[in-house]
Every structure is written in structure tokens, then in C-alpha cells.
Image (cartoon, grey):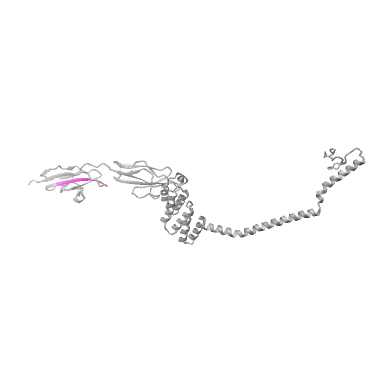
Amino acid sequence: MKCVNCGATIPERWSYCPICGMEVPTRVHTRREHADIREAEQNHLTRKSKPKVQSDALQKQRRRRKARKKRLAKMRRQRRLVICAMLLPIVLLMAFFIHQISYSGQISKGNKALTLSNYEKAEKYFKSATKKNRKRVEAYEGLAKLYVEKKDLESAENVFLSAIAMQPSNTQLYRSAIKFYLETNQPEKVPEVLNDCEYEEVLKELKDYVTPKPEFDLPEGTYHEVQEVALTSKGNKIYYTIDGSNPDIYSQKYEKPILIHKEGKTQIKAISVNKNKISSVIATKTYNIELPIEEAPAVSPSTGQYEEAAQIEIIVPDGYTAYYTMNGKDPSDPSSGASQYEGPISMPKGQTMFSAVLKKNETDKYTPVTKRNYVYKPEE
């Protein structure tokens, strides 16, 4: 049966709704039915209130169990705390010992010794660290710093060069070496260490420090006329020398083609410098200029016997100087005692073996020798 007021289900033989309490209209029950209804109502009320009226003994038993569980949990926590307290010093001691003999520990002790200027101990710790981990750079940097403080830049440099030789693909080693060169004002050595690297990945990572060397538009070789040499390096400044010295940022800055006009060998050395002031390796070209040499000098008069006084003349082209002897010796020989020609020469009496040569100015080149045999016998 459903309650007409709230729609709840009304148990059989109930005279009111157990939810809203509304009385249910019923037919007239017999005395037996009234007794059954009252009994059913009483049983329902008894079942509904039974959980609320538990016995005191059961409640006490549950409280004791709960208290016991709490005591056991507390004892377990205390045992764990005691064990942790006993193990903690051991764990800390082991951690300290492991740290002391580890790579980080050696670095830490090395830096501390270096701070105290105890170089012997610092070197020992840093070298020990390199054996524990050869790939990390802190130990190499520590050793280099140690040698720098001792004013031994060569040993500091060798720390990185030796490590790079063993680990040519370790980018961090190259970075540390570059940092060392820049901090010690040796930027010109950066391209040297990178120039030997054959690993594209390393060069790609360090592209800011890689500067291509200048390009020459004229192949080196021998030329028989004045030459011009143009240098190029995309986006970079160029510095050069022509005296054989190595260029740097204080050398002649390239702004226009270089004119090679002197005879002989001229060596051009050039570097490129990028926006980070990192230079390239030195590019070198040697040019040899050999300008055509004149033929043997023209000398007048010609060979012969003369009875009247005559003047001996040598025709001297521009860019040459004439030398002569009157004893038949080769005037191009430094030991001949040759005289420099400055104008016409009076022919001496008797027989004269006249020899003349031209020397190209600013060079050691001589023309072939012209020889004349004069016999001057004046009339009596």
C-alpha cells in the first residue's frame, strides 16, 4: 500500500505512514487483526532503535580494541624513529666519505686548497678528479687556473690541448680552452685549436668562434709584371702584412687591393676577424715578380784604334744604373772594383779593355756585359 500523502510504502497491517505519520484509512479489523498490527508496529520500532541502544559491555570492548590499536601504532612509530636515529649517523658518515672520494669531492677540496694557495695539494686533487671522470671539465679548468696563478701559461694551455687530443669530440673541452685563451688575452690561439677539429658537431656548436680565413683572388706564383691582389672574407674584417710577420688586429687593415710592384718575392699574410673579435687562422700566399731585364748596354764608340781623343758613353735606361771597368774585369763582380757610370769618360792613351754592365735598381739583377777594346794613339 502507498501513502496518499508522501507516496511511501506502508508496511502491511500498519495504520499510519512510517515516513510522514499520516493515518491510513482502513476497514474495521477484528480483535485478532488489531493485535497483529500492534505487534508488527512494535517489532519494527524495536529493530529501528536497536543500533542506538547497544550494550555498555560491547561499547567498552570496542573502545579497548581501538585504544590497543593506537598503542601498537604508536610503538611501531617509536621503533621506526629509534632505528632511523641509529642509522642516520651511519648514513651521513657514508655519504660524507663517498662525497670526499667522489669527483665532486675532489673538485671541492682542490678549489679549497687553491684558495689557500696550497698548489701542491690542489694539483693532486684536480688530477685525481680527472682520473675519476675524464669527460667533465671542472678538473681541467681547476688545473689551468692553478698554473695561471703560478704564471705558467704554457702548462695551463697544455692541460686543455692534452685533454682535447684524447677527447677530440668533447665540445665542453673546446669551450673551456677558448675561455682560457680569452681570459689570458690570447685570442689568436682560438682559431688554432679549432682548426685541428675534424668533428662537424663540435664546430657547429662553436660556430661563433669559427672564422673562415681570407680568400686570395690571385694564385701564388711567378709573374713578369706588376700585380694586384684582392682579399675577401664575407662579413669579416681583414688584416694583413707583407713583411713576413704574423698579422693581428693591429696590422694593416685591408681596404683595397694590394699592389705588388717590387721585384722579387713578396709574402702576404692575412687573417679574418669576426664580430666576436675571434680571428681566423693565417692565410699565406707568396708572389714572385720577375720583370724583364734589359739587354747588354749600348756603349760607344765601338772597338777600334783611335788617333784623336774620344769620349766613351753608356746609354742607361730608366730604372737602371751602369757600372764599368777599364781592365777587362767583369763589372758585375763585387770584387772587380767597378766604378758607377755618371757621364762620358775620356778614353785613356794606350790599350783599354772597357767593360760595362747595367744593374736593375732595387734588385741584384745585372744585364749581360758589353766589352770594348780601345787603342788610343794620338798623332805626334
Q: Residue furthest left?
A: 380
| Closer to us: 143 or 322 | 143
Residue 354 lies left or right of residue 221; in this view the side is left
- The answer to which image quadrant residue 93 occupies is bottom right
x, y (%) of residue 96?
55, 58
x, y (%) of residue 211?
43, 45
Residue 205 lies left or right of residue 68; in this view the side is left
- Identify the residue at horizontal 58%, vertical 59% (top origin): 90
- Identify the residue at horizontal 20%, vertical 45% (top origin): 357
x, y (%) of residue 92?
57, 58
x, y (%) of residue 168?
44, 48
Confirm whether the magenta stretch covers residue 319.
no
Q: Main secondary structure of the magenta part?
A: strand
| Closer to us: 63 or 350 | 63
Extent of the magenta region: 353-361
Residue 268 lies left or right of residue 363; in this view the side is right
- The answer to which image quadrant residue 227 occupies is top left
- Identify the residue at horizontal 77%, vertical 54% (top origin): 61
Quarter of the image that includes the N terminus:
top right
Residue 251 lies left or right of residue 27; in this view the side is left
| Closer to us: 145 or 62 | 62
Number of numbered markers: 0
